[in-house]
Amino acid sequence: MHRLFAKQVAKATGPTGAVEIDQLAALVGSAYDEFDRDRRRTDRSMSLMIEEIDAKNRNLQQLVAERTCELQARERDLHAQNVRFDIAINNMTQGLLLYDSSARLIVCNERYIAMYGLSCEVVKPGLSLRDLLLHRKELGSFRGDVDEYCASVMRSVAMGKTTDILTETPDGRSILIVNKPVDGGGWVATHEDITERRRTEEKIRHLAHYDALTDLPNRAMFHERLLEELARIAPGDQLAVLYIDVDEFKNVNDTLGHLVGDELLKAVGSSLRRCAKPCEFVARLGGDEFAIVKAAVKTQADVAHLVARVLMAIRVPFDCLGHRVTTDASIGVALAPQHGVDLEQILKNADLAMYAAKSAGRRTWRFFEPEMDARVKSRRILEIDLRQAIADGALEIHYQPCVSLCDNNITGCEALVRWRHPERGMISPAEFIPIAEETGLINELGEWVLTRACAEAMTWPEDIKLAVNVSPVQFRSGSLALKVIAALAASRLPASRLELEITEAVLIRDDDTALAILHQLRTIGVRIALDDFGTGYSSLSYLQRFPFDKIKIDRCFINDIAEPEGSSCIVKAVVNIATARHMVTIAEGVETSQQHELLRSLGCEEMQGYLFSPAIPAAEIRRLLHSDRCRAVA
Amino acid sequence: MYSQQMTWNPPTGWTPIATEPEKVSLVFYFGPREMLACGKRYRELREMFPAAHILGCSTGGQINNSDVTDEEIVAAAISFHSTRLRLICRDINDPAHSRRCGEEIGRALNDDQLAGIFVLSDGLNVNGSELVNGLVDAIGPDIPLTGGLAGDGANFKETLVGGDCAPRSRMVVGVGFYGSAIKIGHGSAGGWDLFGPRRQVTKSRGNVLFELDGEPALDLYERYLGPEDSKGLPGSALLFPIEVHDPDQPDSSVVRTVLAVDSKARSMTFAGDVPQGWTAQLMRGNFDRLAEGAADAARQARTGLNAREEDHQFSILVSCIGRRLLMGQRSSDETEAAGAELGSDTLRVGFYSYGEISPHAKSGICELHNQTMTVTTFAEVEA
């Protein structure tokens, strides 16, 4: 009997021993119900569990699929990243190596292999630094001690120090190696071929210190060297600084062109370099200026010898692009400590000495003298005064009559500017005109003279002409013709009464531009005279190129015209040329009757000079003109 | 030590008549709530055993040796030779005070002679886990602590506990055993089978479980119970206890059983904590394996009892109401299995509870258990 049923029977058995069938049936029925319920519960829970597990499985499968996709995508990304990484490191200009903490290669780019011509079969991940260096040594791209090099690198890496090593390869390349430790104990090594960079740097350094044209040390290096030399002048010694200015270089440039000018500078540079001794430092300061520093000067004779060598070196005719060019130099010398120990001071003094040599007519040399400084200063003061005088209208115009050699009548007057300095009295135009030209004040001054003189000429008889000098500087300003027109308009002076006197220098500087201006002036109706004829180049081609109205024969030909071997034949020749070209000739500086007579006999048409009248103030010339007219009329 | 068993039912009253009642120092009695609620049974026992500490509680069925009954009160009267006893009662008004209540009882019972404690507690208004934690805090982990939470059949309405007083709701009683003569063996086992997927406790607060794997816990239970059993909630939820464990300590798993459900909040209240983040897995019972679990618990208690075969032994069996609900008439399978292990000479009384208190079979740390059979065996060794 089933244990449960036995219990049920026992439970349904009454005190009498009789089994209560109803109670037993209830117990049995209840037990069946319990079993049924348990079975249903079990069924339900099992199927729910299966459903749940199935759903979980599906979720898991989906998750696995998603994760697989993610992983595959990540793998693809990683691959693409690796490819990009490879491209990046293999296209670097530097060789790149990555080592692990045990000095074994993790990454090496193609550039490194190519740099040293190594074998890809040997140089690959896993290779130790030592074996790599042995391989390089075997192929000849490494010369040092392998073990020593390895130990040095490992030491630096262990200390966490980035090291830069500059090496020269046996084939002459400069390689900069940088070893930089990385997290985890390894390091990154970059190898950069800096050969070209070093060359460029060297070139830049050279350019910074040397003149590109002559390859001589430049002004900056000259200053550096001079500072050094000034600091180590031995007791009793002197240091000489020579400033050398190539005479008339500008003319060479202007006449033969810049290329020839450059060639001349190169030739002068080379010549100076050749003539200098090892203790003499030659530099080009710029333009046509050179300089030499000579140390350990014992006597002035040492300097004189050097100057002699320099002048000889420069005076050698040079062949410049087929042109045989002869040149000369003006040299200024300053000594240290005698003339100063300060860089600025010694440079200034040498410069002053050089200008003194120039002023002395070039082609010579001068030692610095303290008076030079004083002269420059006084010149500067004069410039300031002149500026003030022009602004104040304190200058005067005097007029010198021009007289016809035929009838002794006044034909015109030359306007000449005069400066009565409040303290120094009359100052010669020869002194202040160059200052005005150098400073550009000549434009303002010239304009003032032109305007005032035109106005003055309007007070004269109508047949009297006015001659005004024009500086080459005024030509260069480009507005000369306009200013002439303005002056004529303002004074109402007819253009035909105005005569502008120019010198050869106008045509030498810039032929074509000057010619254009001259033609403009001629078109207005202004007459053009060539002043100081015979003193300069006196190129007859000028007469050919521009039809001057008048030629002014310089006083130097007139002075000795009466002498037995004098200039009368020259004057005759000039008069002949002028006559042939329908130009009027006028002689200046006529002081004697003999000269007067001679000139008239030679066919010269006009004259001016003390014989007739010096330049006199406006009021006086006005009186003179009117009395002359009265006399003529009378 | 000597123990004698008595039963009470309406027609016959208390039978048999106890021998030497004046020597009886401890009486346990367990019965249906409606039979105890009037207090008359307690007063009868007090009259019978004037010198004894008397403690008992309402149940979900009584265990009388191998029988499981609903219609009678079962009692055991024990006379100790030399073992001293102390009984402490505490009323508890708020489950939040459970730990403090446990500490108070533990401190009151603790002294250097303390050999073990047996506790009966209200089954519905106490957080059993916290009560046990409070007791262990006071007495330490080495003193055997066993007992159970009172039951109310499958009603879950009210449970009663009494200790030297008529049983009433919201009471906890502990009896301490003192001296070197008393030997206490204990065992605890479930025998439930895990089934279904492991789930994560995604929302809980204390012993209130809201969500498993983001799904309301009550939805899951109702789905598994089906419409018919769902009507019987919360009792029917005992058919599917859950095993929970800290994911970091998978060997320290405990089984939790349902005390109440909140159909609005879709939450379920368990007899012990269900911490958020822990892993939970549903369980289901198979009669044979549940019976085997009971035998295992009895075996642990017997082998753990440091006494001779001939020494008189007495066992209290506390089994879970969930087992009773599942097994129905087959419940006696487990009491028989336990009895077979303990020996037919050992007097066995006990009850179906809303929670069992016993040291964990593996960790040895005293805990509140659900869905287990716990066995406590007493013997007194003569000096």
Image (tube, grey):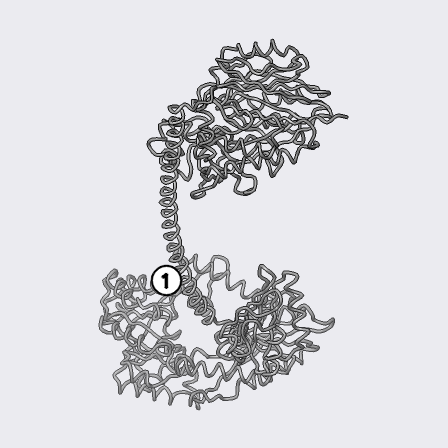
Residue at label 1? A444
Q: B8 left or right of A492?
A: right
Task: Indicate whether A410 appears above or below A426.
Answer: below
Q: Nearer the viewer, residue B63 or A427?
A: B63
Task: Indicate whether B133 appears above or below A464.
Answer: above
Q: Which residue is outermost to the right?
A: B383
Q: Is residue A218 visible?
A: no
Q: Is residue B189 visible?
A: yes
Q: Position of residue A365 (x, y in %)?
A: 57, 78
Q: Position of residue A82 (x, y in %)?
A: 44, 66
Quadrant position of residue A69: bottom left
Q: Position of residue A581 (x, y in %)?
A: 26, 85
Q: Position of residue A70 (x, y in %)?
A: 39, 56
Q: B14 left or right of A50?
A: right
Residue occupying the point 39% across, 25% down? A21
Q: How many marks?
A: 1
Which quadrant is the C terminus of chain B positioned in? top right
Mark 1: amino acid = Glu
Which quadrant is the N terminus of chain B positioned in? top right
Judge the density around disc 1: few (<14), some (14-19), many (≥20) Cα neighbours within 10 Å: some
Q: Nearer the viewer, residue B282 or B313?
A: B313
Task: Indicate whether A67 appears above or below A402.
Answer: above
Q: Nearer the viewer, residue A606 or B237?
A: B237
Residue occupying the point 57% across, 9% down? B43
Q: Chain of mark 1?
A: A
SS at circle 1: helix
Quadrant position of residue A226: bottom right
